[in-house]
Image (spheres, rainbow, N blue to C red):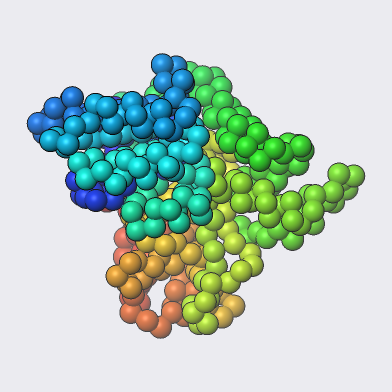
Amino acid sequence: MIQREVYLSKLRKLKNQNVIKVITGIRRSGKSTLLEAFKNELIVSGVSSGNIIYINFEERENLHFTNWTTLYDEITKTVNKDNYYYIFLDEVQLINNFEKLINSLYVKKNIDLYITGSNAYLLSSELATLLTGRYIAINIHPYSFKEYVLANKNENNIDRLFRKYINESCFPEAVTLSQHSEDLVKDYLQTIYDTVIIKDIAKRYKLRNIYNLHRIIGFLFDSIGSYVSPTNIAIELNKNSQKKISHNTIIKYLDYLTQSYILYTAPRYDLKGKEILTTNEKYYLVDLGLRNIAITNTYDTDLGHKLENVVYFELIRRGGKVYVGKINDKEIDFVVQKTNNERAYYQVAFTVNDEKTFTREISSLKNIKDNYPKYLLTLDFDNTGIDGIQKVNIIDWLLQ
């Protein structure tokens, strides 16, 4: 089992702090495994297993827990006021009125509470309002490239491994299955896709036309790293089609897809006007292997956008808000705004060995007049400084 150190380190810092730890992310990204690993750390550190309550609501023996009051009574009858307890509730959104359960447990001073969920409903406006100032969210993704390397110890060729990483799946279980059978990986990814699309979206929102949802997904999966808007999606999908998709339907479906954590959005930020623009965002796919399920995804094609996708999620892991930047008529691939008001700029390209490409990519960064760090990430082998811009090999950067 790969230690998810990025997330474990956050849980260690939050241990015994008076906030609810909310672990979210797409199904099968490793939330339950993360909780198990942290629970084991607690036991190794000396916490008695009798002071740890762990309930996974997807397990058969826990399916009878549907009413929050029954569950609350079940938990609290084993909690006495003279001891401190760690409570882990896995996939808690499956419990009716789960927010009342969370709030009732949180107010007990001898409980450290950890919960997980597979869709953003866990942090819907109702819950967020109820728990304002009481929780910290940790959003977990499939393997980073650094974790992917650790999971593929038998492959010594890093370049070959990286090509697999940007063309195949990095879901933890898919990586394990890939060492045995590619057909098993395809079946596994199909199951994840169907569960998210049918169960988390279509059933929950009572969608009548799943065909249109699949069409929108196909368009977005094929457009990662490109500017899209509900208007241009509608124009493209309604061409030569008798079944028209309305602008409002597309807006709703985009919201459903981001709430299920299958797609993430990067808004545009105007560096000169210092404002977030409301049109033409970019969308990134939580796992590039899922493209193989929804669209024809030829191996080693569209590498520039795949690289962007990888860099986007690595920036998310490293902290801060990630935007796509605009300065005058030029674009910056990523602007990262840190909580301490620090900022960094990133331009991503497959290679800039061609002089025309090099000039185009670096000119956007040169237009920025502040002194925040500026990076040009490529698959070229040289790591050099150019007019205050640091050119870095993407693989080296991912493994830092």
Who is closer to the viewer here, 127 or 162?
A: 127
* Residue shown at 52% from the left, 24% from the top: 188
Q: Quick check: can you spot residue 376?
A: no
Residue 8 drawn at (x, y percent): 25, 41
Q: Is residue 326 left or right of residue 377?
A: right
Image side of residue 114 versus residue 272, left or right: left
Which of these two is toward me, 347 or 255? 255
Task: Where is residue 212? Give x, y as percent.
Answer: 75, 41
Looking at the image, which is closer to me, 275 or 324?
275
Q: Residue at x 28, y 34 (%)?
A: 87
Residue 133 placement, left or right of 298? left
| 227 or 266: nearer the viewer | 266
* Whole-percent x, y for residue 209 in the image: 77, 38
At horizontal 64% and vertical 51% (from top left) the residue drawn is: 254
Q: Residue furthest left?
A: 46
Could you say which quadrant of the image residue 247 lies in?
bottom right
Q: Is residue 150 left or right of residue 213?
A: left
Is residue 85 visible in this depiction of the protein?
Answer: yes
User: Quadrant location of the N terminus?
Assistant: top left
Q: Is residue 281 above or below residue 24?
A: below
Picture layout, residue 225 above or below residue 194:
below
For residue 145, which quarter of the picture? top left
**Residue at 39% in and 29% down:** 71
Residue 162 point in image, percent of width and height: 41, 40
Q: Count how many numbered circles sit on residues in the image.
A: 0
